[in-house]
Image (cartoon, rainbow, N blue to C red):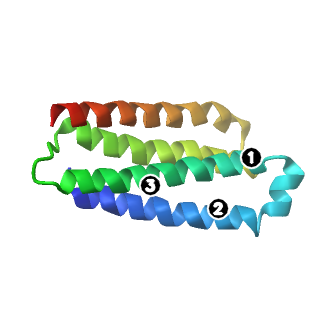
Amino acid sequence: MQHRVALALAGILGATGVAMGAFGAHALRATLEAAGTRSAWETGVSFQLVHAVALLGFAGWLRAPAAAAGGCAAWAVRLWAAGTVVFSGSLYALALGGPRWLGPVTPLGGTALIAGWVLAAAAALAA
């Protein structure tokens, strides 16, 4: 996996995370508070931004000449990106009154995020 892919994903997730945070704090504040879902929205934003920063750091590590950019590293990046979209995306949708079937989808995104962290550790130990 090229470091540029992780860097691009970090930029996309970071930019949209800031936008979603601002959108929730301003344009949707009254809606989220009335529905009692502001906390869910903020959790989605927090996880999205944390994983954007993780991808940014991982991109730097992948760029280093000594980094082993093997399968574990590539899958860590993929799982963080997909897991963030599923986890945070389902929370955003649920906070806005989305279908209840999204409730069980959120932990699938969380599981992908955890697996990404395990693979990041495996990639580091293999380097």
Q: Check the image and name the residue furthest to the left.
A: 65
The three-letter code of the residue at mark 3 reads: Ala
For residue 52, which numbered disc appears in the image? 3
Any part of residue 22 in sight: yes
User: At label 1, which amino acid type do we have?
Assistant: Ser
Residues at circles 2 and 1 in contact by the CB criterion of under 8 Å: no
| The quadrant where residue 28 appears | bottom right
To which residue does mark 2 refer? 21
Asked which secondary structure carries label 3, the reply is: helix
* N-term mark: 1 or 3: 1
Residue 36: x %, y % from top left: 84, 46
Q: Alpha carbon of mark 2 to alpha carbon of mark 3: how far?
A: 14 Å
Query: What residue is shown at x 64% (from left), y 61% (from top)?
Result: 21
Q: From the image, which quarter does the C terminus lie in?
A: top left
Amino acid bearing label 2: Gly
- Sequence-wise first label, 2 or 3: 2
Residue ID at (16%, 54%)? 64
Q: Which residue is mark 1?
A: 39
Asked whether residue 97 is in view, the answer is no
